[in-house]
Image (tube, rainbow, N blue to C red):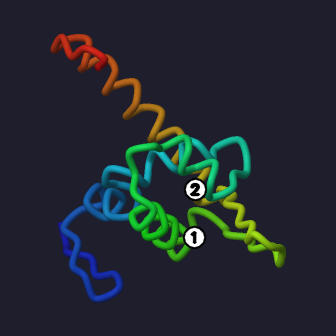
Amino acid sequence: MPDFVYDKKVYYNPVEFAMDRIGGTWKMPILWRLRDKTLRYSDLKKDLPHITHKMLSSVLRDLEREGFVTRKVYAVVPPKVEYTITRRGLKAVPVIETIRKYGAELMKELGVKEK
């Protein structure tokens, strides 16, 4: 299979490429929460209490740059920012759903307990 180049990075297969777009600890959980509603930054932070503000901002910027979410800023005080999933982001939702289901089954099979 040939190598693929995108944004000066070489990819060796489509899975690697896709995971670079939506993989990592936080991208899929953020897209999952946006799948059927627009959320404010503060709502995402409340729903993902273990993510730092710096990481949430960074991941949202990545998702926006890659076209998975849109960001709308309202000129009010205090600042109001909303995030909405795009068509590209919605295409990732069935993949995330499958990974979530597989993860839950694997956790059960391996006896992983909720904390």
> Is residue 11 toward the left or the right of residue 82 in the image?
left
Q: Are the residues tagged 2 and 1 within 8 Å (C-beta)? A: yes
- Name the residue rendered at 29%, 55% in the picture: 15
Q: Say which residue label 1 marks.
A: 67
* Disc on res. 83: none
Neighbor class of circle 2 (other Cα within 10 Å; few <14, some 14-19, many 20+) is many
Q: Position of residue 101 (x, y in %)?
A: 40, 24
Q: Earlier in the sequence, mark 2 or mark 1?
A: 1
> From what the image shows, is residue 103 above or below residue 108?
below
> From what the image shows, is residue 108 above or below residue 66?
above
- Name the residue rendered at 31%, 17% in the picture: 114
- Name the residue rendered at 40%, 57% in the picture: 52
The quarter in which the C terminus is drawn is: top left
Q: Say which residue label 2 marks.
A: 89
Q: Position of residue 88 (x, y in %)?
A: 59, 60
Neighbor class of circle 1 (other Cα within 10 Å; few <14, some 14-19, many 20+) is some
> Is residue 74 toward the left or the right of residue 113 in the image?
right
